[in-house]
Amino acid sequence: MRTGLTPEDLGDMLDRPLLATLATYRRDGLALLSPVWFEWRDGGFNIAIGRDDVKARHLRRDPRASVVVAEVEPPMRGLEIRGSARLLPQSPEVDRRIVGRYVAAAEVDDYLAGLPPGTLVRLEPGELRAWDFTDEHH
């Protein structure tokens, strides 16, 4: 396994419509792991969630968060970042870009119309881990 990589070393992985897993923290300190849609932009993750979503409530109380994205097929690239998330105002432009990564173009407007009022989670690396298995021979 190659470690110590940068996001740029991962090629197109962060452009692919993979699910990410967002970790937020419950009041009792246990992590909540949630599959989320994302975009990687300007050196961090943008994740659109509902304004009243449990993840937003967790982050308002405790901004610590982690995100991991990984492939399940070779070369099994992956990226994890940990840091303090910022909750930003909902951005229709960002919502459209994120939904457009996962939904057919003809369905984006209908999908966006059905979303509850939201907020934007911005997570930039405090700590970053990137890896792949390019050098593994099976």
Image (cartoon, grey):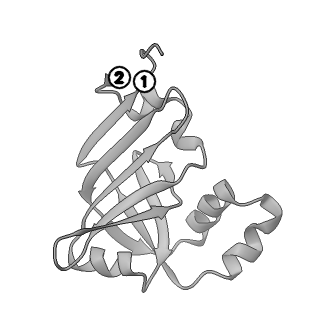
The percent position of residue 101, horizontal first and vertical second, equals: 65, 54
The percent position of residue 109, horizontal first and vertical second, equals: 75, 72
Query: Which dot marks residue 1?
Result: 2
Q: Secondary structure at mark 2?
A: loop
Q: Amino acid at mark 2?
A: Met
Q: Decide which of tag 1 and tag 2 comes sooner along the chain.
A: 2
Q: How far is disc 1 from disc 2 in space, using C-alphas?
A: 5 Å
Residue at horizontal 64 percent and vertical 63 percent from the top: 99
Residue 136 vertical position relative to residue 106 in the rendered view, above or below: above
Residue at horizontal 38 percent and vertical 60 percent from the top: 22
Q: Which residue is mark 1?
A: 133
Residue 4 vertical position relative to residue 68 in the rendered view, above or below: above
Q: Amino acid at mark 1?
A: Phe
Q: Quadrant of the N terminus?
A: top left
Using a 10 Å C-alpha cutoff, classify the residue at mark 2 as few (fewer than 14 neighbours), some (14 to 19) or many (20 or more): few
- The mark total stands at 2
